[in-house]
Image: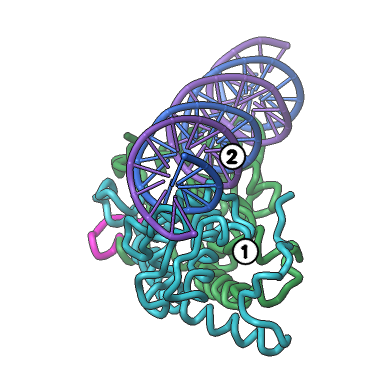
Chain colours: A cyan, B green, C blue, D purple
DNA sequence: TTAATTGATACTAAATCAGTATCAGTTAGG
DNA sequence: CCTAACTGATACTGATTTAGTATCAATTAA
């Protein structure tokens, strides 16, 4: 059971880059390099983030992307819902009103409870909180957060 | 984000049927009819449950399947791990020791915490607990739990 | 003018998901 | 001893999702 797909995963990292350089436009190429995300893939994600009004863009040379919303207001839950649809445990059985026989749908309220727990947990984790963690980790190691010169170690197999 | 796939989903329901008729062998056909699960699909799931020693089988005419373990000891977590692999949030980034640079893996400990929460929640839900809920729901409505004559309403689209 | 950039799509390969089909071996009961 | 009802094992299929690539047009700073 893998919870986050590449879309969400990359989106989180892209937003961390953007949150780390607020006020200036950052190009997709820069983000892609910094976070080791496939360039064209990233561009689609950014368009999606624009559609959801999390970031804004400026076209043309020296254009790029900038975070529009407060990093503390962007939770993992929202990103998951954008890129992977609503958090739900089992679609066919417990949704869709197919199971009119309540005795057959006994799992349902348990499942709904878990869905709520999962949503709440992901809601707690925001781009802002992650960025602070990242800054702390950087301080511990005497490096700047989101150090641009850091090697891209998360390469693909 | 869909948490349970059909495998897990059907497995839970099959185990509920088996737990509801402990001590006797129940054929795949009976379970399939009772829970409205595609017959051949179900047979593969049952083989998998045998391999994991959750159920035992008897071959030949009037053969079938029987629950081997205590229903209270079979949690959703175990079933998810059998049919969907270990509960993990994001494979590539935070696993596999690829991210040696700790500053780049800041999400990791947050993610691990969520993974634990999710595992714990699914652990709490067992075949035994579900069966009791089901019996309660049945009593409320004046029907027997897992009533064999109940119509199969969860048909597929 | 041009090089760097975003906007918008179209395309592909591989993996996973959900389901079907087949054949061999086993067993209870007539 | 036959046969019908089973399980065991495995191969196959079509649809969908996932992850990634490619292309072309429009915009803008220098």
Q: Nearer the viewer, mark 1 or mark 2?
A: 1
Q: Looking at the rendered structure, which numbered label has been put on residue B75? A: none
Image quadrant holding the N terminus of chain B, namely bottom left
Name the one closer to the observer, B89 or D13: B89
Q: Residue at x 73, y 66 (%)?
A: A151
Question: Residue at the spot x=76%, y=70% of the render?
Answer: B100
| Residue at mark 2: chain | B
What is the x, y in percent for residue D18? 54, 46
Identify residue for label 1: A34
Q: Residue at x 64, y 58 (%)?
A: A36
At a point 33% along the width and 37% down the height, the residue shown is: B155
The stretch of residues the image draws in magenta is B138-145
Q: In x, y percent, where is residue B52?
A: 69, 52
Query: Quadrant location of the C terminus of chain B?
Result: top left
Figure check: C27 above or below A147: above
Residue ID for mark 2: B64
| In the image: residue D10, left or right of residue C13 | right
Does the magenta-highlighted stretch encompass residue A157?
Answer: no
Residue B17 in sight from this viewpoint: no
Camera-side residue of B81 and D27: D27
Characterize the local packing of mark 1: few (<14), some (14-19) or many (20 or more) Cα atoms within 10 angstroms: some
Counting other residues with Cα less than 10 Å from the Cα at mark 2, is it few (<14), some (14-19), or many (20 or more)? some
Main secondary structure of the magenta stretch: loop
Tell which of D16 and A36 is nearer to you: A36
Q: Where A100 falls versus D13 (above or below)?
A: below
Secondary structure at badge 2 equals strand
Q: What is the secondary structure assignment of the residue under circle 1?
A: helix
Q: Quadrant of residue B59?
A: top right
């Amino acid at each position: 059971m893998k919870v986050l797909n590449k879309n969400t995963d990359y989106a989180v990292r892209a937003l961390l880059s953007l949150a780390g350089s607020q006020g200036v436009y950052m190009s997709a190429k820069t983000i892609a390099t910094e976070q080791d995300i496939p360039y064209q893939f990233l561009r689609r994600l950014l368009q999606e983030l624009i559609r959801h009004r999390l970031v804004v863009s400026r076209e043309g040379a020296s254009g790029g992307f900038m975070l529009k919303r407060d990093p503390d207001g962007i939770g993992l839950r929202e990103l998951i819902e954008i890129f992977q649809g609503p958090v739900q445990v089992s679609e066919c059985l417990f949704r869709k009103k197919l199971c009119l026989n309540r005795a057959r749908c006994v799992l349902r309220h348990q499942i709904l409870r878990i869905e709520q727990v999962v949503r709440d947990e992901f809601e707690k984790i925001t781009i802002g909180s992650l960025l602070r963690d990242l800054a702390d980790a950087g301080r511990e190691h005497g490096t700047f957060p989101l150090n641009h010169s850091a090697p891209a170690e998360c390469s693909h197999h």
